[in-house]
Image: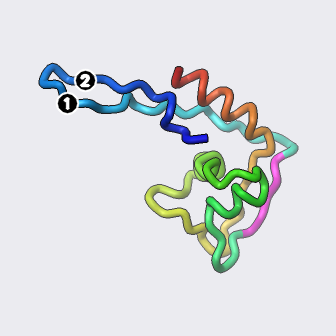
Amino acid sequence: MNRYENIKIEKTEEGKRYRKTVQYPVIEKKTTDIYIMGRVGDRLDTIAHKYYKNSRLWWIIARANNIGNGDLVVPIGKQIRIPVNYIEIVKNYNKLNS
């Protein structure tokens, strides 16, 4: 799943193409969320692969923890929340951006 594949492409009056602004759903805390501590070598994409079986869903973990702006490395010693309801989150993302 490429999170940008359904984002509409617009054109300026000059004909320049651009994608519309991406909208992200609010990722609320749930009692079912998993918590881990960041260790040496942890990356958002590898954590997403471990828990979601899809490394492209790293943005869910990043958004839930307010990290990952330009970097996939997880801060060592930082508690990371892993939302387990990722299917619902992806559905909400697709709804917001359809």
Quarter of the rendering containing residue 29: top right
The residue segment tinted magenta is 33-37
Q: What is the CA distance from the residue labelled 2 to the residue labelled 1?
A: 5 Å
Report the amino acid beneath label 2: Lys
- Say if 56 sits above or below 17 in the image: below
Point out residue 51 in the picture as x, y percentages from the top left corner: 78, 55
Numbered circle sitting on residue 11: 2
Which element carries disc 2, helix, strand or loop?
Answer: strand
* Residue 64 visible here: no
Q: Where is residue 23 in the image (x, y as percent from the top left)?
A: 50, 30
- Residue marked by disc 1: 16
Check whether the beta carbons of the residues at disc 2 and disc 1 lie within 8 A of each other: yes
The image shows residue 47, relative to residue 84, as above or below, that is: below
Residue at (60% x, 21% y) in the render: 95
**Residue 35 highlighted magenta (yes or no):** yes
- Colour convention of the picture: rainbow
